Image (spheres, grey):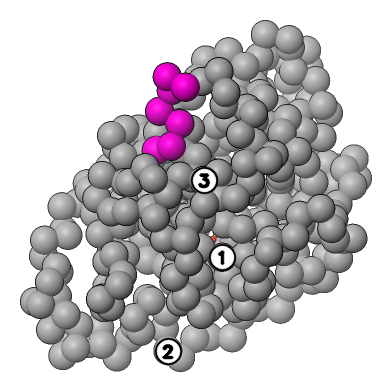
Amino acid sequence: MFIHRRRGWEIAEREATPEAIVTGRRALLGGAAGAMALATGPAAAQWNIFGRRPNMPALAERAPLVAPRNPKYEAGRAITPEPEATTYNNYYEFGQSKSVYDEAQALKTANWKIELAGMLARPRSIGFEDLMKQVSLEERVYRHRCVEAWAMTVPWVGFPLADLVKLAEPASGAKYVVFTTLADKATMPGLRASWYPWPYTEGVTMDEAMNELAFLSVGLYGKVIPPQNGAPIRLTLPWKYGFKSAKSIVKITFTDQRPVNFWQALQDSEYGFWANVNPEVSHPRWSQAKERLLGTDEMVATKIWNGYGDQVASLYVNLKNERLFA
Ligand SMILES: Nc1nc2c(c(=O)[nH]1)N[C@H]1C(S)=C(S)[C@@H](COP(=O)(O)O)O[C@H]1N2
Ligand SMILES: [Mo]
C-alpha cells in the first residue's frame, strides 16, 4: 500500500488516490497515527515521502527514438527530469503505488497489435510495427496534470491521434473513440484487485480525437516509451486530467454511444467523462487550484484547460450543460 508522509502544504496523496474510496482504508493511516507508523515502522526505511524507494534500482536502458521537435508545443516551464517522469507513475494494472516501474518491466510488448473495431468499413487488427510505418513521428513538450494535483512536463515522441482516426476510416455516424488497454493477468498483479472495472478504458468525442493536441505517444525523452509510462503506445491528452491518457492501448473502438471510463465506472461523483482541467472546480475531496511539479516539488497555479485553451476551448462552447471539469 502506498504510504505518504505529509507536508503542510500538500494534500495527502493517498487521500487523492482514487483507490482510497473503494477500500476505505484512508482512515487507517490518516493523521498523526499514520505519520507515527511511518516514522517508526519498516515503511520508513522503504519509502521516501513521495513513495519512491531511496535505493532505486537502475532503470533499464531504452533504445533511442528521436523525432524532430514541433516548436509549436513549447510548455513554458522546465522539462521534468527524466528519472522523475519514469519512476513516479500511475499504472494500476501493476499496483496502486507510484513505484510500479520495476513491476511494470514484466509488460510484454513483442508482436503488439491494436484492434480497430466498431463503426468502421473495415474492422481489423493492425500490428504496432506496421502502424509505425504509416505515421510520421514528432516530438512535443506537453504539460501533464494528474487529478491528484501533481504535474510534470515531458517531451513525448508520437503522432497526432487524428492521423490514426483517418487511417482507421470510421463511419460518418461515429461520435466517440474508445480506448481499451491491456489486461493480462499473467503479468499484471494489479488486476487481482477485483473491485476495479478492468480493463482500463477511456474515451473521447470524435471532435476531441481530431483536435491537434490529442496525441498518441510511443516515446519520451528521445527514447522508446518504457512499460511504466504505457508502452508501446498510450494516449496523451494534455488539457485533461492524466487519467484520460490511457496506457498500453490494445483496442480502439468507434461508436455512437458515450463510453463509461474506468474511473467513472468506479466513482462517477468524482471522475466523469470529460475531465478537463479547471483550477476552479474542486475535486470533492481536495482543491485543484495548485499542482506540485515532479522534480522540484514547487507548487504552481493550475490553469484552465491546463493552459491549452487556445487549442481546445472552442470544442466546448456548445456543451455548457455538461459536467466538463470533473
Ligand atoms: N492503463 C492505464 N492507463 C493509465 C493509468 C492506469 O492506471 N492504467 N493511470 C492514468 C493516470 S491517473 C495518470 S496521471 C497517467 C500517468 O502517466 P505517467 O505514469 O506516464 O505519468 O496515466 C494514466 N493512464
Ligand atoms: Mo492521474
Instruction: Name the N-terminal-most of marks 3 and 1.
Output: 1
Q: Which residue is mark 2?
A: 54
Q: Amino acid at mark 3?
A: Ile
Indicate which label's residue lies in the foreground, 3 or 1: 3
**Would you say 139 lies left or right of 113 here?**
right
Q: Is residue 138 above or below residue 134?
A: below
Q: Is residue 7 magenta?
A: no
Residues 251 and 205: in front is 205
Kindly report the distance in space between the C-alpha atoms of the residues bearing marks 3 and 2.
35 Å
Residue 171 image label? none
Indicate which label's residue lies in the foreground, 3 or 2: 3
At label 1, counting other C-alpha atoms closer than 10 Å, the crowd grade (few under 14, some 14-19, many 20 or more) is many
Instruction: Name the N-terminal-most of marks 3 and 2.
Output: 2
For the point 48% across and 56% down, the residue is: 302
Q: Please state the extent of the stretch shown in magenta in the rendering.
A: 320-326
Residue 304 image label? 3
Is residue 202 something one can see in this rendering?
A: yes
Q: Which residue is mark 1?
A: 152
Q: Is residue 65 above or below residue 230?
A: below
For the point 44% across and 70% down, the residue is: 299
Magenta: main secondary structure equals loop
